[in-house]
Amino acid sequence: MISQNHKSTCEQTSLYYYDFLFQKDKSEIPEHILNHIKQCNNCQNQIYRLKKAIKQSEQTEPHVQGKTGTLLANSLKRHFSYINQDTTCALVKPFLPSMLNTSMKISIPTPITAHLDHCPECVRYLKRISDLNLNNANLSRLSQLFAPKTENNNIDCSKANSNIMAFVMMAFQESDEQILKHLCTCSKCSNTIYQYRESIRNELQIENNAKPCFLSSKLSYNDIFDFTFPYGIDINQYKQSKSIQSRISHIRRCPFCLEKIQEFHHIISDINEQPNSNTITKYSMDESKQMANTENSENLYAGFPVHVEVSGAYQEAAVSNSGSTINFTSALKSNILSKNFRKLSKTGIAGLLMAAIILSAMFIYSPKAKALTLAQLYSVIDNINNVHISSFVQGQTESSQEQWVSRPLNIKIIKEYNNLTLWDIKDKSLKTKKLNSDSTNIQMKSQEWASDAESTINKSLGLIPFYSISEVPPGAEWKKVAIDSDSQNIVEETEAYELSYIEYATFGEPEFIKFRYILKADTELPTKVEFYRKLTAESEYSLVTFMTIEYLSDKEFNTIKSSYFP
């Protein structure tokens, strides 16, 4: 066997990451590859990143069924199903929302991204969807709304018409799943719904004398997605949820909230109903292409074994001035070595998945926003590997709790005063000891405990008060703020953001909550999180607790672990 250096061995091993994770029978993986994975921290981290990306996609899109990894793999399969075919806007539209999905980072040129390289119309659609700031779950549902229309179990407009008024009044429990799907996707019925709702909104506006609504300005498009397009909702949960029904009771009587729904309805329907532009692209594989690094070539796809034909009105403009669209492929050249693309033919879709997730963590489908969104902060936190979090009560100099978390190792260490606890999720064990003691108590735990413990590690690490962005309450506000010059331990090159919302108690008065995040400007990683509270809208916020965050290497984490639990 030919001896290879460590780097080349890692590159060779990367072709087997997917097989290592999901094939029960490891006999098809070469023995030297298995041995390398056991000994190589780099490959272990890359495998962990792949596992985390797939798990995140499944957690974020709970309505998508299938085996582990199906979501990402199927996305790439769908992209490459259009090889050697004329690709039009109608074919590309269903892919646009998924390109904004933070859990699916396709970082190689595909038939779909190639069309976007040359079609200004589709780029404009992508920008409009991006401006909606939808979460991953709703982006996935939007892709389904944009999907080509098929036979709908004999549901036609005449059968669905009797349900339109119930739909307008958001009484979705009066319809079954197939009728709701038809009403959401049929342009004729959708337009009728819009007209009815607009008529009701106008009447309410006259009756209410256009009095402002406290809720409408706080509603995001995520908050009203279900009420506008109840595609794929759980009807039983929808009917039984008191909070949902309470919100509907207000919205259906509020012209301002209905205006927000109408605005969202118009944006999505307008994109969905736009005809094809004249731009048609055809993507084909060409293994004869030179695979060397050709970053400075004028050919957009130089360095990739692909050929793209462009026809239509935008052909000359797109080729001569790619800046008029979004030049996805040229951005990839500095992030992906062409030789990795050649290797994809060896492992098919699994190889594509590796290239997408491991070779580029950069999301290149739209320019970086000037301000970080809350969804992007969740994504940043999801990509943390090893972290040390210290919690303080305002006015105290010593921390009330310290946590060290390693996601690749599935280990969490908690220090509270003189007590130490280690969660070893892989071994399903809980170790406890006193700080200055050599005696360690070990409790073996169940698989259920391990699953719950792993879930807490893979969530937002307690840095955000909600496990996922879907749990953020309606009316919550996320904004960028100026750095407080009086704050202690705030270094230069940082940015500050605030998440504020109202917490309603079953009994007593509501509390006004605010979290302030101090982030590194270059990495957007949080370095400090402050928790504020006040009891009335007029009073001043009071700082209650704060956390400081440090990021550790694998070696640094193992050193800390060994010092506490030798």
Image (cartoon, helix red, strand yellow):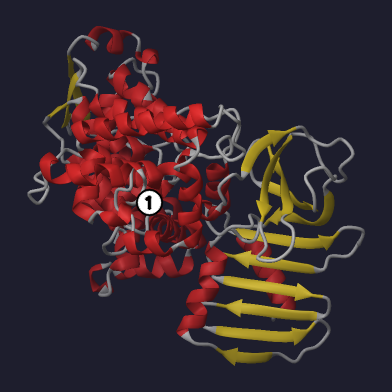
User: Residue 463 vs residue 25: left or right?
Assistant: right
Residue 492 visible in the current orientation: yes
Local crowd size for mark 1, using a 10 Å CA cut-off: few (<14), some (14–19), many (≥20): few
Task: Estimate the x, y position of residue 374 in percent, counting from the top left.
Answer: 57, 43
User: Residue 216 vs residue 289: left or right?
Assistant: right
Query: Can you identify the residue that label 1 sits on?
Result: 11
Question: Residue 30 or 180: which is nearer the viewer?
Answer: 180
Residue drawn at x 29%, y 53% is 232
Residue drawn at x 55%, y 49% is 378
Task: Estimate the x, y position of residue 346 in percent, counting from the top left.
Answer: 21, 51
- The C terminus sits in image quarter: bottom right
Judge whether 468 appears above or below 197 on screen. Answer: below
Task: Estimate the x, y position of residue 359 in percent, counting from the top left.
Answer: 41, 44
Question: Residue 11 or 313: which is nearer the viewer?
Answer: 313
- The N terminus sits in image quarter: bottom left
Residue 333 visible in the current orientation: no
Secondary structure of the residue carrying numbered label 1: helix
Which quadrant of the structure image shows residue 235?
A: bottom left
Residue type (three-letter) at the residue carrying disc 1: Glu
User: Residue 209 vs residue 505: left or right?
Assistant: left
Judge whether 380 appears above or below 386 on screen. Answer: above
Task: Estimate the x, y position of residue 217 in percent, counting from the top left.
Answer: 58, 34
Residue drawn at x 15%, y 39% is 149
